[in-house]
């Protein structure tokens, strides 16, 4: 395994509250030849100075305001064989570097970590967000290779990253830039391996409102991506799971509205409405019973409350997609 070098890129914007927890395990396992690069996107809370205290190289994107630009700026300053992108609120587990190096020599082009089964704080919304991702990564995805990626902890060969031109900086904020890159990588013949052994603790906490706003924006971004994408690139990447593996979400997005419509019709005196609501609930239960049971087992009372958040989350999909469609018709592509 000699000669393997790793450049770690951590984009940050006012992330001093979590940055120390993120940089500490990264610095502890770095080897000679590795690099720690923090791309500071206009922070005003001392994030850059904190990064320097960890002997990180601090760079800044030419244009502020986008996760894609911040990551690209960090990658431009890197010289390692591999790039490892780590979010400023994602804490790597012990042994992370050895696992990446072992996988990197197997011929894969990129390595994707998973969310931890643990979540910070006491909020059911935070637990739901973290555990839903963990469940999808570890239960729904059945093969070792995936067609998507999540840049909270994502390693890729530097040569492949540069050949593809990095992340698309036209995608502002932090939304679908990772899916766009993954699609281009896999279309070029690259392979992304899922590494469930690397469970990354996500420190971001959500209120219910913050969760719904985040998911609304993410669904809209994914819908716009689907409408503008280059169809010659093959299968789209809107999730690390394949469409078949995410069928419970697809059917749930329809059946949740069937459930509401059936209940409304039933209470209005139209008897077949009760049949529609019962059928819709059966479809929802078939698709999500596994997650509900796992959520309760892992999170206890918090897991019970988190399981119920499936319903408002599914309700967002159709109106958010419709909203994106209207934007696309008005000429908004990103």
Image (cartoon, rainbow, N blue to C red):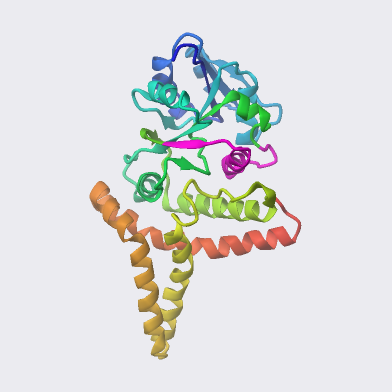
Q: Which range of residues does the magenta coloring cover?
A: 168-194
Above/below status of 139 relative to 47: below
Is residue 176 part of the magenta span, yes or no?
yes
Decide if residue 40 is in sight here. yes
The answer to which of 228 and 92 lies nearer the viewer is 228
- The N terminus is located in which quarter? top left
Residue at 37 percent of width and 83 percent of height: 275
Residue 80 image point, x, y percent: 56, 17
The answer to which of 289 and 51 lies nearer the viewer is 289
Q: Quadrant of residue 48?
A: top right
Is residue 119 part of the magenta span, yes or no?
no
Q: How many marks?
A: 0
Residue 125 image point, x, y percent: 38, 50
The answer to which of 326 and 163 lies nearer the viewer is 163
Residue 79 image point, x, y percent: 60, 16
Above/below status of 86 relative to 56: below
The answer to which of 111 and 32 lies nearer the viewer is 111
Residue 258 image point, x, y percent: 45, 75
Decide if residue 230 is in sight here. no
Residue at the extreme top: 32
Residue at 39 percent of width and 21 percent of height: 98
Residue 319 appears left or right of 300: right
Residue at the extreme right: 331
Q: Quadrant of residue 43?
A: top right
């Amino acid at each position: 395994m000699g000669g393997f070098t790793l450049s770690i890129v951590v984009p940050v914007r006012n992330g001093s509250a979590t940055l120390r927890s993120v940089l500490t395990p990264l610095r502890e396992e770095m080897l000679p030849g590795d690099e720690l690069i923090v791309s500071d996107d206009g922070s005003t809370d001392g994030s850059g100075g904190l990064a320097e205290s960890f002997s990180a190289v601090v760079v800044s994107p030419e244009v502020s305001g986008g996760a894609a630009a911040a990551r690209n700026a960090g990658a431009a300053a890197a010289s390692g064989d591999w790039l490892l992108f780590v979010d400023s609120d994602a804490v790597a587990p012990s042994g992370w570097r050895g696992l990446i190096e072992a996988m990197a020599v197997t011929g894969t082009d990129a390595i994707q970590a998973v969310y931890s089964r643990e979540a910070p704080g006491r909020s059911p919304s935070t637990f739901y967000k973290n555990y839903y991702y963990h469940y999808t990564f570890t239960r729904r995805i059945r093969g070792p290779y995936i067609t998507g990626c999540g840049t909270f902890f994502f390693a890729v060969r530097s040569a492949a990253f540069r050949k593809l031109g990095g992340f698309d900086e036209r995608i502002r904020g932090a939304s679908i830039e990772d899916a766009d890159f993954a699609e281009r990588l896999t279309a070029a013949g690259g392979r992304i391996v899922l590494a469930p052994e690397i469970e990354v603790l996500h420190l971001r906490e959500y209120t219910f409102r913050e969760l719904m706003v985040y998911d609304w924006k993410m669904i809209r971004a994914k819908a716009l991506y689907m409408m503008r994408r280059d169809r010659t690139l093959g299968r789209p990447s809107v999730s690390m799971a394949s469409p078949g593996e995410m069928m419970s979400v697809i059917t749930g997005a329809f059946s949740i509205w069937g459930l509401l419509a059936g209940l409304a019709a039933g209470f209005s005196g139209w008897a077949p409405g009760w049949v529609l609501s019962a059928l819709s609930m059966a479809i929802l239960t078939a698709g999500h019973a596994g997650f509900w049971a796992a959520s309760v087992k892992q999170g206890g009372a918090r897991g019970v409350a988190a399981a119920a958040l499936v319903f408002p989350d599914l309700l967002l999909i159709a109106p958010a997609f419709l909203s994106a469609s209207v934007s696309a018709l008005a000429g908004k592509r990103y």
